[in-house]
Amino acid sequence: MNWYGLYTLFGKEVWRFMKVATQTILTPIITVLLYLLVFVSVLEEHVEVYDNISYTAFLISGLIMMSIIQNAFANTSSSLFQSKMMGSLVFMLLPPLSSFEFYLAFIGAAVVRGLIVGLGVWIATLWFLVLPIYNIGILFIFAILGSAILGTLGLIASIWADKWDQISGFQNFIILPLTFLSGVFYRIETLPEFWEKMSYYNPFFYMIDGFRYGFFGVSEISVTISLSIVSIFFVTLTAISLWILHIGYKIRY
Amino acid sequence: MVTAAVSISHIHKHYGSLHALQGIHFDIPKGCFFGLLGPNGAGKSTLINIMAGLVRSTQGSVRIMDHDVRQQWRQARYALGVVPQELAIDPFFTVYEVLRLQSGYFGLGRENKPWIDELLDILNLTDKAHTNLQKLSGGMKRRVLIALALVHKPPVFVLDEPTAGVDVELRKVLWEFTTHLHQKGHTIVLTTHYIEEAERLCEQIAILDEGKLVALDDKAVLLARYPYRLLRLSLLDRNIVLPTSLQDKVHSFLKDELVLRLHREKDHIGSILDALRIANIQFSDLHTEESSLEEVFLSLTHKDKGK
């Protein structure tokens, strides 16, 4: 293992997003606060979620996870795709870094950005509400797995895409619908039967539900099942991305 | 003991129906200043990218300092520094930051700082060390690319068209710098469109054309292999009628200068001058020129058809 090379690439990726922290950290936090203002003021009295849990608390926990995973995706997809388009990716392909080291560095940075934004959202929402913490370990496990999954999806998307349009298509037609239909804003059992069933096929639902369990100790589905499904999804995507990197798809011709 | 810095063995590369490299097979000796020439699309960059692991060959193998680029890719990459043709930069970082990062990718930490400082100094980049790469001129970016390729002190240094589009001053700096590296024992592989650059710097030359190796030899041998020389005449009157025997020897005829291409063995200068005198063609000056690499290149890549 080229540990120092891996550490340098990971550090470079973190350094990159910290250099533009207004765009990569502050903006997503403000976006979530706007969501919160609008949804809470309109829906607080109208939506029932769990007994003894307010809609605001329910929504904040979902929004924290949503911001974590969306920013993890944005980190790998924008960084890697930009490097690919500008040609600077070559400086990461020439050194003795394996596919696994490359993967770990990019996903590690995506997880760090996801966690920083999630933490920022949590701190910003303290003004609205102090969330209870039922199990901090569960919170971290789902936050890390969720951001690693979306970071991996960002990596796959950026390697696959040939133009910015395709990256934004991936984000707008796959990531965004799956996030919005994952139960961030509502409990899926309140949906019509068809959409409720469809939600069980959405892996993002298990990330949100498991993460929320970490705050409240209640969930729509067993946290063990959520953890298993999220883990399987993570392992599958990791295997796909490592294979893509190994064969050099669209990066080593 | 390994004598080849780069060993290229029966390399084929297909891009769909395009056979970009067709059985390329040669060695680049250790410590050699090696020129890789060829017209656009000949396959030079593809071959270099295969050496660097950026492109994978369809068939065949490449070894860098006896390390297979596919099987022993880590060792092969440690041994190779490549200056890519495109001016690719990372817009987020300064010159010093990208050098530190590139050094880190090769597993080198603070201990490599003196060498980074030396590179900045040699390439006249010290005063730009803390400038963002985006704000550099094209020439300065080219220098940064060279520093990046050398940051891990590779024994084999490859420059893919390093002087394309750079001004005369920078070209001179690059020539001096690569010569200096060569003297220190580095193996230098240079691809260039400027034939005079290869002629001046390189000891051995390979010429690729349409994916095939059409020549590989010491520069002197390659030059000697071309059997022609030029006879340059400054005419007193450009309105002349050339004797039939000389008409197929005209290399160029511009303004008052007539250039004849003569075979070293078959064409005797005395006979040529006799023919000119009989045809009453008068001239104020004449001199002969030995063949240049450019003529060798053109003859081997069939770009001199019709001459």
Image (tube, rainbow, N blue to C red):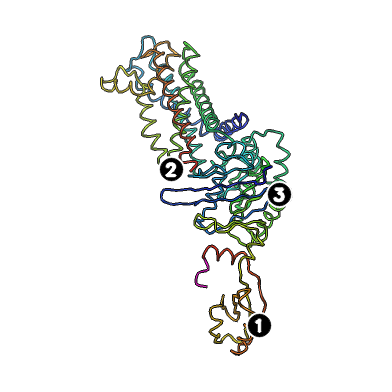
SS for callout 2: loop
- Earlier-in-chain disc, 1 versus 3: 3
Q: Looking at the rendered structure, which numbered label has been put on residue A162? A: 2
Question: The residue under label 2 is which amino acid type?
Answer: Asp
Asked if the residue at tag 2 contacts the one at tag 1, i.e. Cβ–Cβ closer than 8 Å, the answer is no
Provide the residue designation for mark 1.
B270
**Does label 2 lie on the same chain as label 1?**
no
Depth-wise, is mark 1 or mark 3 nearer the camera? 1
Q: Is residue A251 magenta?
A: no
Image quarter in which the N terminus of chain B is found: top right
Give the magenta-colored segment's residue range.
B303-307
SS for callout 1: helix
Asked if the residue at tag 3 contacts the one at tag 1, i.e. Cβ–Cβ closer than 8 Å, the answer is no
**Which residue is the extreme one toward the left?**
A193
Measured Cα–Cα span from mark 1 to mark 3:
47 Å
At which x and y percent is residue A16?
56, 35
Name the subunit of mark 3: B
Question: The residue under label 1 is which amino acid type?
Answer: Gly
Depth-wise, is mark 3 or mark 2 nearer the camera? 3
Provide the residue designation for mark 3.
B181
Q: Residues within 10 Å of mark 2 (few under 14, many from 20)?
A: some
Left or right of A71? Residue B132 is right
Name the subunit of mark 1: B
At which x and y percent is residue A99?
52, 33
Give residue A222's quadrant in the image.
top left
Residue at image position (39%, 23%) is A204
